[in-house]
């Protein structure tokens, strides 16, 4: 994936933080007829790998056993920007703010029950932050029965477009347009990603250029 430097997420830790902030990713494997199969999955990034739990039989398992080369993608739609933000009538000016990570790597089924338990506990910590569950250990039957897919990244790239290419005054102009279209409360999390602070009175202030 070729990226313009101004759109590339340069920090590996920020890529990892983004991955673990998102509820789902998509794994792409190749089926028996040579077509890509893309499936949304719960996942966690831990110990330099993507982990997912799965039923032990199924098409994606067959695909991985036949060809372990896979893709994995996670994205966050931040905001659609209508064309009239930029031009009164030219529809081609419409744009989108977003963050995405694309991984190419090798998928394996984890056989070691200790590693499986560690991965399953990491998944629970991500998705059930309130606790109220018994931590899994390698001796539990459920750990042996469930499949855990591990994707070992060979290439991991992040891309973001959240207004970092705009000057502070232009970001403020866009922020006002977003508030007008979306409403202040809906706009708040969007503006936070864009590096725009909003006080309780609705006043706007652009922080330094947003970076990832």
Image (cartoon, rainbow, N blue to C red):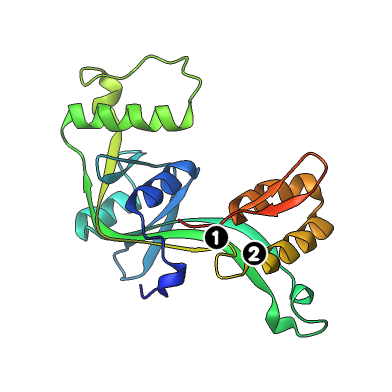
Q: Residue at x 55, y 60 (%)?
A: 209
Q: Is residue 62 above or below residue 93?
A: above
The spot of residue 85 in percent (x, y) is 76, 72
Image quadrant assignment for residue 137: top left
Toward the viewer: 33 or 84? 84
**Mark 2 residue crowding within 10 angstroms, few (<14) / some (14–19) / many (20+):** some
In x, y percent, where is residue 34?
31, 71
Q: Position of residue 118 (x, y in %)?
A: 26, 28
Are the residues flagged by discs 2 and 1 in contact, CB closer than 8 Å? yes
**Image point (27%, 46%), residue name:** 49
Q: Which residue is mark 1?
A: 209
**In the picture, residue 135 is in which quadrant?**
top left
Gap in Å between the C-alphas at discs 2 and 1?
Answer: 7 Å
The secondary element bearing badge 2 is classed as helix
- Name the residue located 81 percent from the left edge and 46 percent from the top edge: 202
Looking at the picture, how far across and down is residue 198, in whole percent? 73, 46
142 relative to 148, above or below: above
Residue displayed at 35% across by 38% down: 55
Q: Which residue is mark 2?
A: 168
Residue situated furthest left in the rendering = 112
- Circle 1: element type: loop
First reached walking from the N terminus: tag 2 or tag 1: 2
State left or right for residue 160 relative to residue 206.
left
Compared across the picture, whether 81 is left or right of 177 comes to: left
Please give left or right for residue 56 compared with residue 174 in the image: left
The image shows a total of numbered marks equal to: 2
């Amino acid at each position: 994936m070729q990226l313009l430097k101004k759109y590339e997420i340069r920090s590996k830790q920020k890529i990892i933080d983004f991955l673990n902030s998102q509820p789902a990713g998509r794994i792409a494997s190749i089926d028996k007829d040579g077509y890509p199969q893309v499936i949304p999955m719960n996942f966690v990034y831990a110990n330099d790998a993507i982990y997912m739990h799965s039923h032990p039989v199924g098409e994606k398992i067959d695909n991985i056993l036949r060809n372990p080369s896979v893709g994995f993608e996670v994205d966050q739609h931040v905001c659609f920007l209508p064309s009239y933000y930029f031009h009164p009538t030219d529809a081609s000016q419409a744009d989108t703010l977003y963050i995405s990570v694309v991984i190419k790597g090798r998928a394996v089924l984890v056989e070691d029950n200790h590693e499986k338990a560690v991965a399953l506990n990491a998944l629970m910590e991500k998705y059930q932050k309130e606790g109220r569950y018994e931590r899994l250990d390698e001796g539990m039957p459920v750990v042996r029965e469930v499949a855990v897919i591990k994707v070992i990244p060979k290439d991991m790239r992040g891309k973001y477009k959240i207004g970092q290419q705009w000057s502070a005054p232009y970001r403020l102009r866009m922020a006002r347009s977003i508030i007008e279209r979306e409403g202040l409360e809906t706009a708040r999390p969007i503006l936070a990603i864009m590096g725009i602070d909003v006080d309780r009175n609705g006043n706007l202030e652009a922080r330094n250029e947003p970076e990832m």
